[in-house]
């Protein structure tokens, strides 16, 4: 949105398109320097009080931006429900930039998008191949870290074999084991949805979590 003041109109358009009178979670998907966060959250609070929005979230907010949004909503007695950011074993920056710690401090759910790192953690590229299309030119399929991908996926496979699970399911489980974290893996068909749900049916040991943490330290940078 170009301005904070555009939010009410954008929300009404979305509600009409969805043929709904309210949405469960309404998120501002990217902070722009020209959008006043406090003003935007005030309008979000208006939408909650009007019954159009049940919960307010943000996406790709830094720790400082999240605090600003949290405080503006708190002044209206409304919690900040979520911050949706990229987070996976191959993208651990939320641990280093304060976002994850701030989420835990303030009771905000971190919604992890790209939890399988664009498919890199599924094991499909364990042989060193790269995906077709534009993904091959993006991380983690380019640069020096690509060469560190194979041992990570090998470890995921070794752990998964103990439980009859795939590398991707172990990678999702690692996120589920984190406090205040909810991964949202994509699914192009029913089989992929069933596969992703398999991450809910087992748990990792503390040692297994530590092994995965140690193996992906480079991806915290």
Image: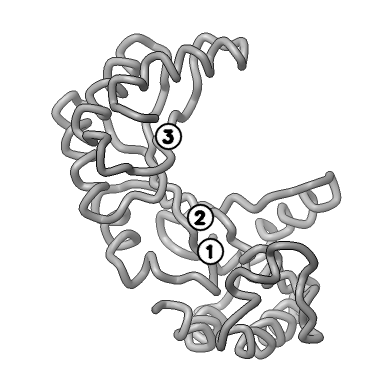
Q: CA distance from mark 1 to mark 3?
A: 21 Å
Q: Which residue is mark 1?
A: 175
User: Residue 136 versus residue 45: which sits nearer the camera?
Assistant: 136
Q: Which residue is mark 3?
A: 27
Residue positioned 49% across, 15% down in the render: 22
Label 2: which secondary element: strand
Q: Give residue 78's position: percent from left, percent from top.
A: 26, 28
Q: Residues within 10 Å of mark 3 (few under 14, many from 20)?
A: some
Residue positioned 84% across, 44% down in the render: 190
User: Residue 32 versus residue 123: which sits nearer the camera?
Assistant: 32
Relative to 90, is 65 on the left or the right?
Answer: left
Label 3: which secondary element: strand
Residue positioned 79% across, 81% down in the render: 129
Q: Earlier in the sequence, mark 3 or mark 2?
A: 3
Q: Which residue is mark 2?
A: 112
Relative to 197, is 35 on the left or the right?
Answer: left
Q: Give residue 153's position: percent from left, percent from top.
A: 69, 81
Rendered view: 79 above or below 220: above
Q: Earlier in the sequence, mark 1 or mark 2?
A: 2
User: Residue 34 versus residue 102: which sits nearer the camera?
Assistant: 34
Q: Are marks 1 and 2 in contact (CB under 8 Å)?
A: yes
**Colouring chosen for the image of the structure:** one colour
Q: Earlier in the sequence, mark 1 or mark 3?
A: 3
Name of the residue lying farthest toward the left:
75
């Amino acid at each position: 949105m170009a301005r904070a003041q555009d939010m009410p109109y954008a929300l009404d358009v979305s509600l009409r398109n969805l043929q709904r009178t309210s949405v469960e979670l309404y998120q501002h998907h990217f902070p722009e320097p020209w959008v006043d966060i406090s003003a935007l959250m005030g309008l979000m609070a208006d939408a909650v009080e009007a019954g159009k929005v049940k919960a307010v979230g943000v996406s790709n907010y830094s720790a400082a931006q999240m605090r600003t949004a949290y405080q503006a909503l708190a002044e209206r007695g409304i919690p900040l429900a979520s911050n949706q950011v990229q987070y996976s074993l191959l993208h651990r920056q939320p641990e280093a930039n304060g976002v994850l710690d701030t989420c835990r401090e303030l009771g905000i759910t971190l919604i992890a998008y790209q939890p399988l790192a664009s498919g890199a953690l599924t094991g499909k590229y364990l042989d060193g191949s790269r995906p077709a299309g534009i993904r091959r030119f993006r991380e983690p399929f380019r640069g020096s870290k690509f060469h560190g991908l194979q041992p990570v996926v090998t470890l995921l496979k070794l752990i998964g074999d103990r439980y009859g699970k795939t590398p991707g399911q172990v990678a999702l489980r690692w996120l589920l084991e984190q406090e205040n974290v909810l991964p949202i893996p994509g699914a192009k068909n029913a089989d992929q949805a069933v596969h992703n749900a398999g991450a809910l049916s087992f748990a990792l040991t503390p040692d297994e979590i530590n092994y995965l943490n140690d193996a992906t330290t480079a991806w915290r940078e």
